[in-house]
Amino acid sequence: MKKLFTLILVFATITAIAKTNVGENIDVTHYEIHLNNIDFTNHTLQAQTVVTLTALNAINSFELELKSLNVTSVTSNDANVSNFTQNDGILTISLASPLTANTSASFTISYGGSTFNESWGGIMWSGNYVCNMGVGFESIPHNLGKCWFACVDNFTDKATYDVFVTVPTATTAVCGGNLIIDTNNGDGTHTVHYNVPQEIATYHISFAIGDYVEWTDTYNGIERDIPITVYVKPSQINNVPGTFVHVKDIASFYENNFGAYPFNRIGYVVTSVGCMEHVDNIGITSGVVTGNTTQEEYVAHELSHMYFGNLVTCATAEEMWLNEGFAQFCGVFYRSEIYGESDFQQAMSSKTNNITTWCKSESNWIPLNNVPQTMTYDNSAVYNRGAVVVNTMMNYLGRETFLSGLRSYLASHSYSAASSEQLRDALTAATGIDMNGFFDTYVFTAGMPHYGVDLLNVTPNGNQYDATVKMTYQHYGPEHVGQNNRVEVTFVDNAGNLQTELVNWDGEEATRTVTLNISPVAAFADYYNHFLDAKFDNNMTATAPATLGINQQLSIVVSSVNDSVMLRGEEHYVAPDNDHNIPGTTLSTKHYWNVLRLDFGESEVSGKFTFSNNANMDGDIIHSENDSAVLLYRANINEAWHSIPYTQQGNWKIGIMTVNDLQSGQYTIAAIDKTQLGLNESIIDTKKMILAPNPTENFVKISTKSGNSEIVIINNLGQTINSFPISENEITVSVEDFPAGVYYVNLLDEKKNIISTEKLVKR
């Protein structure tokens, strides 16, 4: 099912919850449904359903569900019916003598009356059109096969069907399955008979009645020719070819990846309210039939349900991601075939970023396999999060291995229902890759993982290079330590060449060595945004002035460039590791940034870092004006966090820190407790101090605008190398004994407040 346009989910009013034990002692194998006397004015119908079932044990009675409609009789040639009762949507049929275990019997149930519907779901009437939608968003449980025939209305008790619909001669009736015969009754009516030979759930069988025009075609499938039927209103018929121009290509893509098409025809019919994945008779709204491909995602999404949802159905509503997550993924995945791989990757990356942001909210920490039924059809919690997890699974396994595993899963659970655990076990058995860790992290645990990678060492290995990396795992959300961790790590060399490898480890951290064809200067986890993880990233190669935005918290600005500059920015939604030694200072517990900058030619690049006392950003370390926000930097984890030159705009609550010469490395926000250190609020101004010459070998002249100040020189480890008072506007300092490297000169005022910082390079 794919929600569309103005559809609004309303969960405030929930209908009565049906008894969960309906059908527990029987297995329904076939339904024969007859719809008659359909009244478009009063929204009523008369019907009869023959239910064929097998007793699972000796039974004296059994229950079916029927909503709103009133039963007038129950008869059987195979059993002695003593009586029946209806109460709160439950039809109880009592037998005069027990039906023994494993005995089959058929029961004919006659009923009629006003049909049930809600804002989206049930039997939907619209003028001279009527159809069933299979489910309802407000009803709990959601299944609404019970709105038009007596049944066991769940995901697991599947059956075959014959459907007979009698309507006026000029009216079209279309149902799921194969059209067996269309009989002219000679009384101004005709009866269509459709048969579904496959076992399907009650919410997948359908009817649609109205003034429809049929458009037909044939898809030459991998095993057989498959009819294509599209039923639309007369005014829409000319739009059908343009809307369904790629339907055969989509079907071919699904067959090649998931296996032979599992049902009878590729069928669509226009409904008044929305899209629904009925077998052979997919409901689509009029808004899809535009005459072009602007709404093609819905054509693809619903067709993929023939595999995910219809062939294999989620075992419970709480696991709807097995239906809708896979279909939402397929509604993007097909684009790789029709529009190219980059189109698919861009669309999926956008979904991944959106779900990363959604998962940041504590109110959204819900395990994917246990979503509350009030959120069964939630677009973020189920549809898009499920799609992103499926895409993550594909990249975790590798595309071909993933698709091979899916085909095995679909084959082993065909025309049945499956749980998340059964999908996990099927993939593990088919691929030989233990999927327990993946499902524990992405499906059974709320929140999302965070993967960190730091390049520790690179050594030549013949014509190749051995790169040793430190891999870390943190979990954004409930406490969880990932096992069988597996993520793409992309290595970058000074020329901008990339090489990506899958890296595996267990637990919170590990070191791994990877042999590469390039000599890397940096390494990034999930460079291509193929995995759901707790970070936001963006890449750009700029050949002209441009801005690279990183989730509104970091902007990398290229002011000028005479060749090109390769940039990557990442905001990580976890605390930075490797604490520093500056007393009275607290590093962010919420986020840090990673930056890559590779210049080819000359360029001017600055970075604008946003801090805020917002609860989702830095509010846990910046509580009041006594907490002064500062920006810290390190080139890699071998360095200690230390201050760098930047200018600051704003106040203690929110501001922007601008680094004029942005370098590769990690950046984080920290807070200085001024009450602990006896400091006042200050804003760093790099123009208050000038160092010359810089770089230098023997001495440096420090010029300031402030008298009665103090100079503190620190190294890259955050250690104080020298400190002294300064009462003049200019002083010369010897650095002859300093080891070669980078140092930071801090200018403090009389109250020990840092008012300027400059980088000093000793040759």
Image (spheres, rainbow, N blue to C red):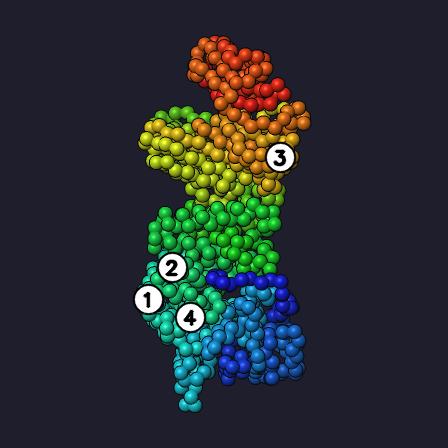
Question: Which mark is nearer the camera, 3 or 2?
Answer: 3
Query: Closest to the observer: 175 or 747?
Result: 747
Indicate the quadrant where residue 763 lies.
Answer: top left
Task: Specify few, some or many for label 4: CA neighbours under 10 Å numbering under 14, 14-19, or 20 or more.
Answer: many
Which comes before the other along the chain, label 3 or label 2?
2
Amino acid bearing label 3: Ile
The label shown at residue 622 is 3
Real-space CA distance between mark 3 and mark 4, rounded to the nearest whole angstrom: 57 Å
- Mark 4 and mark 1: Cα distance apart in space: 14 Å
Q: Looking at the image, tell me whether mark 1 or mark 2 is earlier in sequence order.
A: 1
Residue 87: image location, x then y, percent: 66, 76
Q: Are marks 1 and 2 in contact (CB under 8 Å)?
A: no
Q: CA distance from mark 4 to mark 2?
A: 18 Å
Is there CB contact under 8 Å for labels 3 and 1?
no
Q: Which residue is mark 2?
A: 294
Q: Residues within 10 Å of mark 2 (few under 14, many from 20)?
A: few
327 to the left or right of 220: right
Above or below 80: residue 564? above
How far apart marks 3 and 2 lie (CA) works out to 47 Å
Q: Secondary structure at mark 3?
A: loop
- Helix, strand or loop at mark 1: helix
